[in-house]
Image: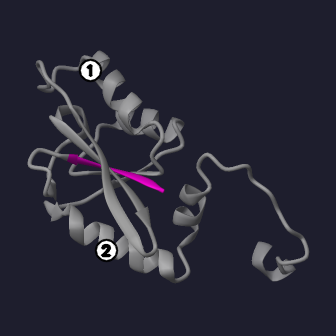
C-alpha cells in the first residue's frame, strides 16, 4: 500500500498538509518498505485561505491509502477523505521510519478496521460468505 507523509526534512512527519514543501510517498508491505517518490511544492504555501494550492497536493496523494500530517485543515481533510485516503494527524514531529515500522508490525498482525478499509483502496470489494461468520457482522 502507498503511504504519504507531509514533511519538510524528509525524515519526520513535521508539516501541515497545506503548507508542506514535500510529500514523501512510500510503498509499505508487511515485510518491506521503500521510498517511491518525493513530490516537492514551490511558491507561496502560507495559510491564506486559497485552496487552489491544495490541488497539486491532492493529486500527489490520490493513489495513497494513508496520509500522515502534523496538521490539516477541515476542508482539506474532507477533500483527502473524499479521495478515499485516510488522514492521520501526528501531535508532535515523528520519524517517518518509526511510523513505517509500526505500520509493518500492524500489517503482520490483525490490522484495525480503519486500516483494513485503507488496504482495500484500489481493489474491488468482495465478500466471501463462507469465510465470514455472522458474529463478525453484528
> Viewed as shown, does residue 26 lie left or right of 14?
right
Residue behind mark 2: 101
Position in image of residue 39 (x %, y %): 25, 35
Q: Which residues are magenta?
A: 1-6
What's the mark number on residue 69? none
Position in image of residue 94 (x %, y %): 17, 64
Is 21 rendered above or below residue 109?
above
- What secondary structure is marked by label 2? helix
Position in image of residue 116 (x %, y %): 58, 65
Is residue 138 shown to the viewer in this render?
no
- What secondary structure is marked by label 1? helix
Q: Quadrant of residue 135?
A: bottom right
> Viewed as shown, does residue 11 lie left or right of 33?
left
Dot 1: within a 10 Å radius of its alpha carbon, few (fewer than 14), some, or many (20 or more) residues?
some
Residues at marks 1 and 2, CA–CA distance in whole angstroms: 31 Å
> Viewed as shown, does residue 50 lie left or right of 31?
left
Residue at 76% x, 78% y is 136
- Main secondary structure along the magenta-highlighted residues: strand
Question: Reading the chain from its start, which is encountered first: label 1 or label 2?
Answer: 1
What's the mark number on residue 53? 1
Give the quadrant of the C terminus. Answer: bottom right
Q: Nearer the viewer, residue 60 or 50?
A: 60
Q: How is the image coloured?
A: one colour
Amino acid at each position: 500500500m502507498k503511504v504519504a507523509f507531509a514533511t519538510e526534512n524528509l525524515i519526520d512527519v513535521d508539516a501541515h498538509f497545506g503548507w508542506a514543501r514535500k510529500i514523501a510517498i512510500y510503498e509499505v508491505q508487511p515485510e518491506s518498505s521503500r521510498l517511491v517518490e518525493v513530490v516537492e511544492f514551490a511558491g507561496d504555501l502560507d495559510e491564506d485561505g486559497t485552496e487552489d494550492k491544495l490541488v497539486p497536493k491532492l493529486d500527489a496523494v490520490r493513489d495513497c491509502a494513508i496520509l500522515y500530517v502534523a496538521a490539516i485543515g477541515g476542508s482539506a481533510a474532507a477533500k483527502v477523505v473524499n479521495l478515499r485516503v485516510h488522514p492521520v494527524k501526528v501531535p508532535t514531529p515523528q520519524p517517518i521510519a518509526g511510523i513505517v515500522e509500526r505500520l509493518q508490525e500492524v500489517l503482520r498482525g490483525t490490522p484495525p478496521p480503519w486500516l483494513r478499509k485503507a488496504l482495500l483502496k484500489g481493489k474491488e470489494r468482495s465478500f466471501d460468505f463462507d469465510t465470514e461468520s455472522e458474529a463478525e457482522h453484528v
